[in-house]
Image (cartoon, grey):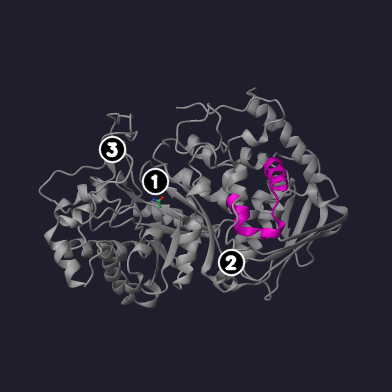
Amino acid sequence: MHIRSLLSALLISAAAVTNTAAGNAAEIAIVPLPASVTTAQGSFTFPATVTYSVPAYTGDSINVLLQRMIPELQKATGSKFRTSSDAIMKLELDPKLGAEAYTLDVDNDGIAITASRPAGFFYALQSLRQMLPYTSPEASVTIPVVKIVDTPRFGWRGFMLDEGRHIFGKEEVKKLLDAMAAYKMNRFHWHLTEDQGWRIEIKKYPRLTDVGAFRGSRSLGWIGLEPDTMRYGGYYTQDDIREIVAYARDRFIEIIPEIDIPGHTQAAVAAYPELLACDPENPHEVWLMQGVSDDVMNVANPAAVQMAKDIIDEITPLFPFPYIHLGGDECPTDKWKENAACQSLLDSIGSTKYRDLQLYFYKQLTDHIALKPAADQRKLIFWNEVLHGNTGMLPDDITIMAWVGADKAAHEAAKRGLNTILTPQIPYYINRRQSKSPTEPVTQGHGTETLKAVYDYVPVKDIPADLHDKYLGVQGNFWSEYVMTPELLEYLMFPRLAAIAEAGWTPQQKRDYDSFRNRVRALRPMLDAASINYCTHEFQAEGETPDVFEQL
Ligand code: ACM
């Protein structure tokens, strides 16, 4: 048996003890930590048949949710579940609770759950699930008497995956959505376009994927690193997208597609140079390198603006959620400066700052969206570099995603009256090395973004109270320049994703790293049961040699 499996097996039995013992709060391992957990003497043992009752709700959605989750509860408890008006597990509506809030009350005789909306019931069941074992129980399952009163700190608890550089596929995305849901995360920001690959089918512009989704190297070149010669690529069809959107919705996760324009677009330019390139006479190819390409869209070409509008029109019905992300980071203006059409457009908008061409491009897109029927309206999100341009051109319902100089940028956005989301590059880019150990796989960073460093970031620190409502929440980002396999993706992402989930959910004054680490450790069987290849550095016993990730 591999040492990792052996350790996990030991921990599974440790967690079973944890999860069957009645007693104090320390024995209840829930991640993220609920807002309030009160334990008392006593315990509840799941009988052979668990009767449950479900309140009537619009469209029968709570019942549908239960139907989906019951098999998991049956597996975890070994009990059969069936509905009954005289139930031992009662779900009841409490309209006073917030949309994602719930109470979970376990006493000696049963379980009572209240929430006002399906999401609240879903999160109550996630908490209950984490209290149960993750291996088939051999005896009756017992959980401690406890009262949990819970509600999230932030409405936005996000995770971003870059599939432009490397694509991981539908099954991996679903696996990550499951993990997000277990940690009560509710926003999946899907970075679908990059210099190195366009990953979403757009029927009106088939070359975006026929050409833009494939390149002549699997690995990406960097200083001292040559691209290989393997043909590499892939993309999501619109049917794939619909399937993943439905999967996410079942888990109360909204998807925010990111079409990163007008920079980070070399793959799109290679597909449609005649519409997008600042220099269509030159050759263009899907990029084989890392870094920031200067081969950006020609924002002064009406055909490029039209193409952006067409893409927005096509993705709008695919993603029935409030937001679309249009990127806006790292957009070099060098090619615009050399382009006569861009120079004259800059004159005509009365600015001398080339960054404003980018903002004017967005203005045309927001004007276009504003003309749509209500059901097709979408709010736009941008990376914080757009603050360097005249954001006054844009509607005030745009949201700034703050990554570089994040705290300062988010504060600046809030002062301008804009909503903002904290995704600080350091320490929330969880593709970076998570330890200084020389055995760490090759990827970005210096190993300083440890689990603890991620955990210890304090969102909305020293911000005047009147700006707090501009801070929608937090998000971890994963960039995949170096990451070619799901195994490495998971190794870097876990368990750090849990630290960001807890920042998004748990009141700041309740957060404590040691408690968090113990709870994540107790929940290792949850990750094992999901076959997630998490990093174990933080879970080693004193003197034990850490697991080494085998570079593929
Ligand atoms: C980014 O990291 N370029 C948003």
Q: Which residue is mark 1?
A: 163
Q: CA distance from mark 1 to mark 3?
A: 15 Å
Q: Quadrant of the C terminus?
A: top left
Residue 288: image tag: 3
Residue drawn at x 80%, y 66% is 86
Tell me the quarter of the picture where residue 453 sits: top right
**Label 1: few (<14), some (14–19) or many (≥20) C-alpha neighbours in 10 Å:** many
Helix, strand or loop at label 2? It is helix
Q: Main secondary structure of the magenta part?
A: helix
Q: Nearer the viewer, residue 86 or 516?
A: 516
Q: CA distance from mark 3 to mark 2?
A: 47 Å
Q: Is residue 479 visible?
A: yes
Which residue in the rendered view is the most extreme toward the right?
Answer: 41
Callout 1–callout 3 Cβ contact below 8 Å: no
Q: Is residue 7 left or right of residue 469?
A: right
Q: Which residues are magenta?
A: 499-523
